[in-house]
């Protein structure tokens, strides 16, 4: 556990309510969604501004303490589990503001603690579209999405988080601010540090702000379900769809075991006797949607 003097320093810096030093609190941040051995951190900090974040990183660096960055902790790779018991966890959930949604130039500026689904909903209110849709989007954060390069069912057609990151601000291990990228689609100036931060899992720096590309929403969409006797037939159908140059918005295969268990939980009325099903969604211009669905 961190010294009382250091704890008081952080309480003065970010507020007592944002410094978690009790055993129960530290235990809460010793694990994530990966099935790995928990490691209890020495301290947990929750800065609520970029300035506080940079100051926390610098103080930890100056005191020789390792740090682990954590968003919502939904990742499955163990990326938010501390490396050692003297590590300090820095939560980014307090940095949760949408700073700008620009409808003219099709971008948004957000802090790392913004919840993915909430961000997508705010973008939709502006008649715009943010495609990345990880399964954890109801609770996962944009910063975590970047660190893990999160995707989802729409990845086949629209890509994943890396395809929408235009710029980034982050603090390096010493607490120095680093900026990369821009608010323009074409940016060929300097190193692509934003691309380097994607999939870095918090090992290269702590994100304080991100610029994300937005796109116009599709004018129409249609959902379909195709039923097959076995998984092989369903897999061949997937190959046939792509070979026909149809790129669905989403395309999900469920085998019989999955069908039954999903139906037990959701009571959705799925075909429980099917060997496999494909859940498909096509989107775009209404005429094209009709053709693709056919």
Image (cartoon, helix red, strand yellow):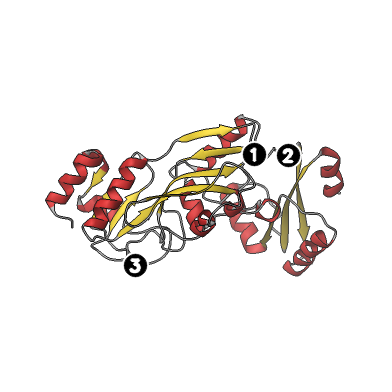
Q: Using residue 156 as the reference point, say whether residue 29 is left or right of it.
A: left
**Camera-side residue: 123 or 58?**
58
Q: Using residue 62 as the reference point, say whether residue 93 is left or right of it.
A: right
Query: Which residue occupies 67% across, 48% down?
Result: 269
Q: How far apart are marks 3 and 1 (CA)?
A: 38 Å
Report the residue marked by disc 2.
218
Report the residue marked by disc 1.
129
User: Where's residue 9, x and y in %?
Assistant: 17, 45
Asked which secondary structure carries label 3, the reply is loop
Query: Which residue occupies 32% across, 65% down?
Result: 83
Query: Which residue occupies 24% across, 60% down?
Result: 65
Report the residue marked by disc 3.
37
* Number of the label disc, if any, that sits on residue 18: none
Asked which secondary structure carries label 1, the reply is loop
**Residue extending furthest front?**
189
- Inspect this view and state whether residue 159 appears: yes
Which image quadrant is residue 150 in? bottom right
Picture quarter with the N terminus: bottom left
Q: Earlier in the sequence, mark 2 or mark 1?
A: 1
User: Where's residue 142, x and y in %?
Assistant: 49, 46
Q: How far apart are marks 3 and 2 (CA)?
A: 44 Å
């Amino acid at each position: 556990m961190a010294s009382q003097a250091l704890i008081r320093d952080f309480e003065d810096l970010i507020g007592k309510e944002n410094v978690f030093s009790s055993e129960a609190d530290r235990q809460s941040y010793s694990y994530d969604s990966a099935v790995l051995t928990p490691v209890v951190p020495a301290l947990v900090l929750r800065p609520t501004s970029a300035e506080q974040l940079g100051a926390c990183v610098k103080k930890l660096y100056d005191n020789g303490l390792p740090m682990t960055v954590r968003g919502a902790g939904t990742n499955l790779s163990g990326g938010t589990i501390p490396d050692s018991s003297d590590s300090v966890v820095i939560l980014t959930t307090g940095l949760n503001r949408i700073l700008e949604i620009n409808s003219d130039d099709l971008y948004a500026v957000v802090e790392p603690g913004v919840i993915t689904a909430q961000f997508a909903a705010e973008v939709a209110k502006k008649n715009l579209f943010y495609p990345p849709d990880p399964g954890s989007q109801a609770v996962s954060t944009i910063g975590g999405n970047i660190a893990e390069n999160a995707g989802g069912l729409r990845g086949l057609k629209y890509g994943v988080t890396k395809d929408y990151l235009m710029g980034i601000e982050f603090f390096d291990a010493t607490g120095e601010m680093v900026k990369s990228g821009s608010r323009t689609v074409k940016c060929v100036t300097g190193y692509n540090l934003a691309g380097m931060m994607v999939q870095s899992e918090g090992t290269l720096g702590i994100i304080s702000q991100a610029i994300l590309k937005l796109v116009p929403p599709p004018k129409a969409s249609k959902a379909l379900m195709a039923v097959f006797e076995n998984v092989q037939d369903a897999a061949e159908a997937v190959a046939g769809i792509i070979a026909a140059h149809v790129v669905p918005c989403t395309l999900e295969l469920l085998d019989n075991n999955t069908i039954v268990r999903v139906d037990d939980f959701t009571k959705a009325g799925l075909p429980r006797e099917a060997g496999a099903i494909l859940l498909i969604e096509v989107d775009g211009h209404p005429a094209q949607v009709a053709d693709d669905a056919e």
